[in-house]
Image: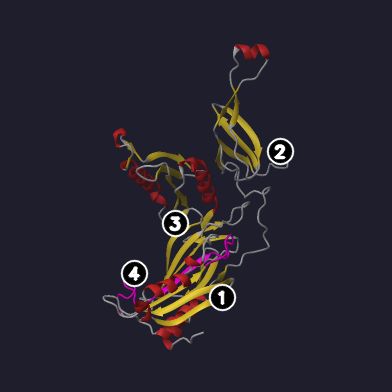
Amino acid sequence: MTPLSPRLQTVFEKTKTVCFGRFLIDVPATAQVAWGRTSVPLGVVVAKGAAPKLQQMVAKYEAELKSEERFPLTKKLNQYIETVDGLLKGQKTVVGYSGFSGSDLRIYSYFAMGADLVQLDARPVYNDKVGTITELNDMARRLRPRADNEVPTEPGMCVEHAFLSDHPTDGPSKYDLVQIGFRLQELSDVHLSIQTNPANPNAGDNSRLKYRMAQAEKANPLAYSKLKYLRRTDGRQIDQWTGIYEALTRTPDEGASLSHHDFVLDYPGVPGDELKPRADIRLSSGVKENQAGAIKPSITDDEALAIWERITSSIRVRPTSTSVPRKTSDSSPVAPAGSLKAATGELCPATGEWECIDHGQAQRRHIRIGQVMPQGVFAAPQNTWQKLRGEASTYVVHTVWTLLDPDASSRANT
């Protein structure tokens, strides 16, 4: 490993551990953390201290959809569809079309998480509206606040200001995307970024960085001959990630762009393994206003290598407790009576005694976690023929169920 220069020894004298997705990384204690897009597997954004703005955000998005036109213009249609209540207290889900034409949707769900405001978002096809809203509600139940320096021990995903526990029955998602970046306070022009996303089972060699660079070199050998390669390796290992390709270069002065460091790491990942996602890691120097090479780099080549090696080598899988078994389909999350609601067609969030009410009539059923919430079946007035034959009259409706007793499994007739 490249030795730290005296000033880098000061920078790395104190470090902090940052949790992102299912992984940990060590960076200088003074480093600024910048989160990018997060989809786990649906989009999530947490705004600190913004819970009082919930209704304002809902109204703003509704107004945005209503102001955007939809084909055909002659019918004066807009892109707003509806706003529905979520399962959490005060949760609002706004449904609209994703564009001028077509049937794809964009759905935003807003709710308060303590003092913070959470926005979940998805862009499903129209016929998956119910399933997507169900998934948004499920994510909302599994999300909790997280201090920026907290390293959770339970299985799940670290996102900015929050933690999403794994689904109690389905386990970890394999479709997560996380973007995070770090800026060194003492060396403000040095930026490092990380993106992890699902490995593509159909990706061939032509999608790898190594192949793309080789093709680019063939196409423009003069330009690539000017690059200074500080290192080019194929087969590096970081924790459980093996077969990593990295190209660490120093670009020359070219027009308005000054010579700067351009480091790239490409890990293809293992399809279906959430602990081995595809990873793209980059380091740039001479950065100003997000433009590499805008100013002269503040670090030497050896310092760039030392920073790169120490930070990337610290990436590791976040350990989780094995003392607490993953919930099975017969177990339920702790939920006080009356605190959970679920609509017809959604997945049951907790095993227990559930009740729905329609026009003063109440119906109770024992429903297990993971089952589809049923329709409500209620008594209706008998017509003359039914009275003569002694037949009951019923009607069926979509309804909202309320959890009455989360501990009723031992007493229910299943």
Q: Earlier in the sequence, mark 2 or mark 3?
A: 3
Q: Earlier in the sequence, mark 4 or mark 3?
A: 3
Task: Name the residue type under label 2.
Answer: Ala
Q: CA distance from mark 2 to mark 4?
A: 60 Å
Q: Nearer the viewer, residue 224 or 95?
A: 224
- Rendered image: mark on residue 84: none
**Residue 138, percent from left and from top:** 54, 48
Closer to the eye: label 4 or 1: 1
Tag 2–tag 4 contact (CB < 8 Å): no
Is residue 322 found inside the magenta-colored segment of the image?
no
Q: CA distance from mark 4 to mark 1?
A: 29 Å
Name the residue that disc number 4 marks.
290
Q: Earlier in the sequence, mark 4 or mark 1?
A: 1
Name the residue that disc number 3 marks.
46
Name the residue that disc number 2 marks.
412
Which residues are the magenta region?
268-295
Tag 1–tag 3 contact (CB < 8 Å): no
Q: Is residue 336 above or below residue 206?
A: above
- Rendered image: mark on residue 237: 1
Q: Earlier in the sequence, mark 2 or mark 4?
A: 4
Q: CA distance from mark 2 to mark 3?
A: 39 Å
Residue 32 is at least partly visible in this image: no
- Magenta span dominant secondary structure: loop
Closer to the eye: label 4 or 3: 4
